[in-house]
Amino acid sequence: MPGFIPFSRASLMLDVVAVAMIVVIPTMAWSIYLVKYKQKYALHKKIQLGLGIGLLIAVLLFEVDMRLNGWRQYAEPSPYYGNWLTPVLWIHLVVAVSTTILWIYTIIAAVRRFVKPVQPNEYSPTHRRVAKAAAMGMLFTAVTGWVFYWMAFVAEGSASKDVANEPPLTQNSAKLSSPQSAP
Ligand code: HEM
């Protein structure tokens, strides 16, 4: 199903996840602000749990969609297809998978150690450390995801045409090594 972002070739589910990441980052920043400067511990817990569950559902739906429909057909016109796209996707996947594991751990550990009423306790220093890494991971996941999205589904240009017009590598190297092609 075609997506709704006007300047993009991506499918609906890819667009949903790209927009979800735009919503997640400011919401997470607001939640950290609330706990750090306003001591709103219970509200911080609610927001982080909501983000965690919402993201898990989005990721599961996204994975099903990728298995069923894939993404490559939308990325083929990209000038980065077949060159930079795969390394960028790998960087994004490594960051995204480790961040998912870290978020699950952060949330489960926090829920178990900050029992009601939610407030600072002896687990605070550990939570602050682990949760900061989890938050940085989410930011990096979003940034690498958007970079991949732009390269795969928004970028268009001459590079792919240049590659398409170039003679195949074997022909090219044969030409270079052939004595007739010397100036
Ligand atoms: C992945 C999810 C979460 C992230 C990214 C996160 C992030 C953070 C961060 C960065 C801080 C430190 C703020 C500062 O610099 O003072 C913090 C503090 C805190 N968080 Fe979370 N949090 C998460 C989940 C939770 C959950 C589920 C709970 C409750 C069950 C919770 C309870 C608290 C409490 C009580 C503090 C205050 C600790 C203190 O300053 O003594 N957090 N959180």
Image: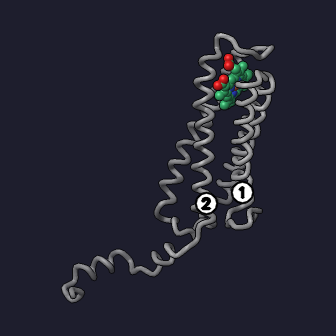
Which residue is drawn at the image coordinates 67% and 67% (left, top)? 9
Q: Position of residue 70 (x, y in %)?
A: 64, 59
Badge 1 element: helix
Q: 136 or 114, which lies in front?
A: 136
Colour convention of the picture? one colour
Would you say 134 lies left or right of 87 here?
right
Q: Position of residue 105 (x, y in %)?
A: 63, 27
Q: Relative to 58, does residue 68 appear above or below in the rendering? A: below
Ligand 1 position by quadrant: top right
Give the residue pinned by disc 2: 150
Instruction: Tell me the amino acid under the disc marked 2.
Output: Trp
Q: 43 or 163, which lies in front?
A: 43
Q: Relative to 81, does residue 51 appear above or below in the rendering? A: above
Which residue is drawn at the image coordinates 80% and 14% (left, top)? 117
* Ligand 1 within 8 angstroms of badge 2 C-beta: no
User: Crowding at label 2, few (<14), some or many (≥20) Cα neighbours within 10 Å?
Assistant: some
* Ligand 1 within 8 angstroms of badge 1 C-beta: no
Where, by quadrant of the figure, is residue 57 drawn? top right
Residue extending farthest left: 179
**Label located before the other in sequence (2 or 1):** 1
Which residue is drawn at the image coordinates 74% and 59% (left, top)? 12
In this figure, what is the number of numbered marks? 2
Where, by quadrant of the figure, is residue 115 drawn? top right
Give the residue pinned by disc 1: 15
The quarter of the rendered structure image containing the C terminus is bottom left
Would you say 101 lies left or right of 14 here?
left
Q: Position of residue 72 (x, y in %)?
A: 59, 63
**Residue 41: assigned label:** none
